[in-house]
Each structure stands twice: as structure tokens, then as C-alpha cells.
Image (cartoon, rainbow, N blue to C red):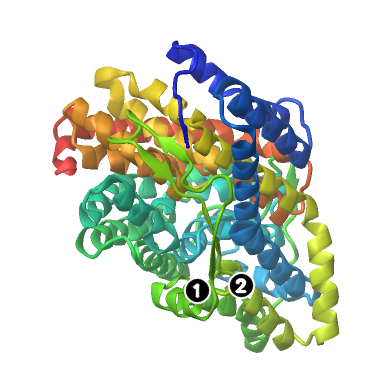
């Protein structure tokens, strides 16, 4: 048994600085020195191993097993999702169906701002609600590339859009996990998050279009942006407060897509933007949009069929009943030798010492990526591929994403080392020592957790207990701060290395992860700070305090 130590240097600032070394190495290599993502991830992994072993005294074999556990989690479920989404995209693109899909979305509106709003925000939220784990970014970024968006715009804007739905992603998994680790009431947590995020569900679409074309051109299309935001935010509030966390994103996304599509049937901007801003070279450089061709209804149905099949399978695989039935057929829960129940978390991160579980869930049948794989196979056969053609395309896809899979495995290895070594808890404790300003900085703990782990669920598991303990010590509502961990965390989703690699893979823009990180970093920090200020208002300032009850 090894007990975690959160202040190995008896100086919290120094300990936090050392704990942050792997983060600085990883993000610095990607963002400042333009090191290829898989090489930067290997460098960050080496730094994480050294810090955990030398500075924190973690036994080397435990650190190595934590890295292996994280790498395995990176490949299943996350890498498995990415591989199969790109496989489906390749199948559709090879047959020319993606061009038809592009033109059909253009039929909803030929304005690129509206296409971005529909694909990245409304449709992306559906995939977040059904699957999570990188699926929405992969799908929406691939679609935006097909619509003529530059790789940077498609990647960065998909990341910005995939924020407000994240707390209720994968059928409410982050909130369910938060309730489990904190012991707080699930419905109270769901309702609190549902009274925080709807304001940002209205703000994010405006922010998204502003980041794309600038403030003036955003104002030209404010009515449909407001429609998309409100039609998502209102169901988000109602379902989260009066039903629970499970169907929040699914219902809100479907309402948002329907309302936006109906609104655009009767509304057109005074000046239609049919060209795509090339975010790599600035606002003055525009790419001409693809020439519009009229497709038959049958052709449009054929182009949309693979993505409808994908949506159906992703939704089915996301439902607890289907997951449970598939797990009953076959699932292996493998305790990680040399790590499981051998690492002890201690106060003040937890109320009482307890051992950390380390069980790898080998659930290939119920993994979301398997549903996507089956959808891709069915779609490929529907599009006319032979079995041999499917095998060849899959091999080509695997070769295409090989470096991305290595990167994701290394990224998750870093996250798991920091979790089991306790270095992430050190960073959280440093922010927790902020007294009356804790509602703001506690929200940033959630942001930090997602930026480090790539998952709102993981951030909630990591810091949920800390949020409750600290809030009770400061006489702040623990439900408020636990919910703030999840709400603040969603804004860290756009800068976590895993999501950036997913975006660069979906857009085939390998080696430019640093450019994507620099594009989204300000937006992530600014939006996380706004969430922090909102939570401060809920804690101290009327009438925001009414939203904390």
C-alpha cells in the first residue's frame, strides 16, 4: 500500500509548480515549439513518470502500471471511437456521398455561419448527448471539412461548440459519476448544473459565430443564433431540473435542430455569407464555396443514410439497457496488477482514507466505438462496398490515424499517472486555498481537471470529493460547488490534448495541434472565467443566489 502525498516539499506553491511540469512540457511542446503531437505526448509522459517517482515518491512499478492502464483506456474506448468514425467518413467520402451531404446542409441555408451553427452546435450536441468521448468533435469537424471549412476553422470551431452540452454528455454520465463520488443527491446536482449551463448554452452559439467571422458579421445573423441557443437552453433547463441528467442533451439537441431548421425556412440574412473564412490566413483570405448542384431527393437520402444509421447506433449503444444486455453477453473486468487497491487517497482530498480502484473494463461489445463500427459496416454495404473493399478501407483508415492513436494513448497515460500519483490533487488543493474567492477558483478546478484528463466525468471523479469537503469547510453549498466542477469543466474540453488530437485527425490536419491549441486557448480561459464569475454570483450576489436553491 502506498499513500499519496500532496505537498511533498512542505510548500504548496512549490509542490504545485512541480506537479504542473508534465502539463507545461506537453502544452509547451505542442503550443510553443510545434512538436508533433505524438512526440509531445511521449515527452509529457516521460515528465509525468519522473515527477511521480522522484518528487512524489510513487513506486516505479505503480507509476508504470498507471501509465499502461491509461494507455489502454486511451485505445478503448476513446481510440476505438475515433478509428471507426474516421472509417465511416472515409467510406462516405470515397463514394462522393459527403459532397451530396454538404449540398443538402447548404439547402437548409447556404450561409456558412448557419451551417456552422447547425452542424457544430446543434448536431454536435446530439452526438455529445448520445456518446461523448470525442464523438461530436470527430463528426462535426469531418462534416465542416466537407462543407469547405479550412482545417483550422473546422477543428477549432468544433471544439468551441462542444462545450455547453458536455456536462450532460453520454446520457448524463458526468453527473451520475459526480453523484456517486460526492454522495450528493443526483437530481439536486442535475438541477444545479441545469441552472448554470443554460445561460452559456445561449452565449456559446454567439461566441462560436463571433470567433468565426467577427462581431459585426455575427450581429447580422443574431436571430437564428438566438433561436438555436434558446431552443437548446430551455429544454436543457427543463429536463435537467424536472427529469434528470440522462436525456438532457438528446432532447435539447433535437429541439434545437428542429427549431433552427424551421426558422431558416422563413428567414434569410440581408447579406448571405457563401464563402468560408480561412482562419489560417486571417479574415481577408476567403475560400470560394463549392459550386452548388441540385441533387435528387433519393441522392440526398442516400447521402444522409450513413449518418442516420450512425446516430441510431450511437443512441442505442448509449442507453443503459443496451449496454447492460451487451455486457451480460461478454465483459471482462481486469484488475490492474500492482496498482488496484494499492494506492491510498488521504484527507483533505477525501473525507477519510480510501484505496483507489484500478480495474480495466474490457467491454468491447458495449463500447460506443463498436456501435459506430457496426454502423460503418452497414453503411458501407449500403453504399455498395464489397467485404474486401471494406477491409481495404479499414486498413487504410488505421494507417491514417496511427499517430493519433499513439498520441491519445500517451495523453491518457499522463492523465492516469497524475491521478494515481496525486499530482492533480496538488493542483486542486492549491486552488482550494483561496478563501472567499473559492467559488471562482473552485470552478477553475473543474476546468483544470478536464484540461488534464480530457473528460468531464474523470474531472468529477477526481475533484468531486475535494469540492464537497472544501465547500463544507467554507460554509458554501456543496451541491453548488460540486455542480460548478462539472460546469466549469466543460470549458476545459476544448483545450485538452485528447480533443485537439481528435479534431486534427478528423480534419486530416496532422502536425498542427499547436496551431489548434493557440486558436482555442483564449476562448477556453475566457469562458471558464465567466462560468466562475457566474458561480460566484450564485454564492454571494442576489438575484443569482436564487438560482442556487
Report the residue at 70% width, 75% height from top.
Answer: 100
Picture coordinates of residue 246 (x, y %)? 34, 65
Residue at image location 74% in from the left, 37% down from the top: 42
Q: CA distance from mark 1 to mark 2?
A: 8 Å
Question: Is 344 situated above or below 123?
Answer: above
> Quick check: 236 left or right of 28?
left
Instruction: Name the secondary structure under disc 2.
Output: helix
Residue 60: numbered disc: none
Residue 85 coordinates in the image, percent (x, y): 66, 66
Q: Nearer the viewer, residue 318 or 325?
A: 325
Q: How many marks?
A: 2
Front-lying residue, 534 or 315: 315
Residue 27 x, y percent position in the rendering: 65, 30
Label 2: few (<14), some or many (≥20) within 10 Å? many
Instruction: Name the residue carrying label 2.
Output: 370
Dot 1 crowding, Cα within 10 Å, few <14, some 14–19, many 20+: many
Left or right, residue 475 beside residue 179:
left
User: Are the residues flagged by discs 1 and 2 in contact, CB closer than 8 Å?
Assistant: yes
Residue 217 visible at all: no
Badge number at residue 317: 1
Is 19 displayed left or right of 352 in the figure?
right
The answer to whether residue 521 is seen in the rendering is: yes
Residue lying at 70% horizontally and 71% vertically, measured from the top left: 88
Helix, strand or loop at mark 1: helix
Amino acid at each position: 500500500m502506498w499513500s499519496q502525498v500532496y505537498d511533498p516539499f512542505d510548500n504548496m506553491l512549490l509542490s504545485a509548480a512541480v506537479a504542473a511540469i508534465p502539463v507545461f512540457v506537453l502544452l509547451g511542446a505542442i503550443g510553443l515549439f510545434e512538436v508533433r503531437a505524438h512526440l509531445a505526448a511521449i515527452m509529457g509522459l516521460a515528465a509525468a513518470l519522473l515527477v511521480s517517482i522522484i518528487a512524489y515518491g510513487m513506486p516505479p512499478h505503480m507509476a508504470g502500471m498507471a501509465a499502461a492502464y491509461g494507455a489502454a483506456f486511451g485505445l478503448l474506448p476513446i481510440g476505438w471511437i475515433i478509428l471507426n468514425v474516421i472509417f465511416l467518413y472515409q467510406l462516405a467520402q470515397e463514394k462522393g456521398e459527403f459532397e451530396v451531404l454538404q449540398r443538402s446542409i447548404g439547402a437548409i441555408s447556404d450561409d456558412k455561419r448557419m451551417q456552422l451553427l447547425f452542424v457544430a452546435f446543434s448536431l454536435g450536441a446530439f452526438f455529445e448527448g448520445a456518446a461523448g468521448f470525442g464523438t461530436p468533435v470527430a463528426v462535426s469537424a469531418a462534416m465542416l471539412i466537407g462543407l469547405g471549412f479550412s482545417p483550422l476553422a473546422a477543428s477549432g470551431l468544433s471544439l468551441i461548440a462542444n462545450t455547453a452540452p458536455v456536462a450532460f454528455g453520454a446520457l448524463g454520465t458526468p453527473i451520475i459519476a459526480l453523484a456517486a463520488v460526492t454522495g450528493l443527491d443526483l437530481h439536486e446536482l442535475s438541477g444545479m448544473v441545469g441552472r448554470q449551463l443554460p445561460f452559456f448554452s445561449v452565449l456559446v452559439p454567439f461566441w462560436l459565430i463571433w470567433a468565426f467571422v467577427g462581431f459585426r458579421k455575427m450581429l447580422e445573423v443574431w436571430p437564428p443564433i438566438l433561436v438555436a441557443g434558446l431552443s437548446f437552453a430551455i429544454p436543457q433547463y427543463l429536463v435537467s431540473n424536472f427529469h434528470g441528467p440522462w436525456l438532457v442533451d438528446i432532447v435539447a439537441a433535437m429541439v434545437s435542430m428542429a427549431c433552427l431548421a424551421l426558422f431558416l425556412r422563413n428567414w434569410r440574412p440581408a447579406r448571405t455569407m457563401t464563402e468560408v473564412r480561412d482562419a489560417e490566413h486571417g479574415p481577408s483570405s476567403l475560400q470560394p464555396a463549392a459550386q452548388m448542384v441540385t441533387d435528387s431527393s433519393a441522392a440526398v437520402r442516400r447521402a444522409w443514410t450513413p449518418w442516420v444509421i450512425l446516430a441510431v447506433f450511437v443512441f442505442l449503444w448509449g442507453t443503459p439497457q443496451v449496454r447492460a444486455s451487451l455486457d451480460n453477453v461478454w465483459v471482462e473486468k481486469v484488475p490492474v496488477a500492482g496498482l488496484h487497491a494499492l494506492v491510498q487517497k488521504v484527507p483533505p482530498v477525501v473525507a477519510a482514507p480510501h484505496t483507489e480502484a484500478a480495474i480495466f473494463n474490457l467491454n468491447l461489445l458495449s463500447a460506443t466505438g463498436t456501435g459506430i463500427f457496426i454502423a460503418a459496416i452497414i453503411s458501407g454495404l449500403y453504399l455498395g462496398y464489397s467485404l474486401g473493399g471494406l477491409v481495404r478501407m479499414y486498413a487504410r483508415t488505421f494507417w491514417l490515424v496511427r499517430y493519433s492513436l499513439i498520441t491519445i494513448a500517451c495523453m491518457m497515460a499522463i492523465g492516469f499517472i497524475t491521478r494515481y500519483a496525486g499530482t492533480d490533487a496538488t493542483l486542486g488543493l492549491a486552488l482550494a486555498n483561496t478563501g472567499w474567492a473559492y467559488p471562482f477558483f473552485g470552478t477553475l478546478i473543474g476546468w483544470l481537471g478536464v484540461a488534464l484528463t480530457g473528460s468531464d466525468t474523470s474531472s468529477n471523479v477526481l475533484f468531486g470529493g475535494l469540492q464537497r469537503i472544501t465547500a463544507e469547510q467554507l460554509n458554501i453549498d456543496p451541491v453548488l460547488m460540486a455542480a460548478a466542477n462539472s460546469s466549469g469543466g466543460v470549458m476545459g474540453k476544448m483545450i485538452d490534448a485528447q480533443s485537439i488530437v481528435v479534431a486534427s485527425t478528423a480534419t486530416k490536419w496532422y502536425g498542427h495541434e499547436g496551431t489548434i491549441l493557440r486558436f482555442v486557448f483564449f476562448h477556453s480561459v475566457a469562458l471558464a472565467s465567466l462560468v466562475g464569475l457566474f458561480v460566484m454570483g450564485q454564492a454571494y450576489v442576489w438575484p443569482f443566489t436564487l438560482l442556487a436553491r
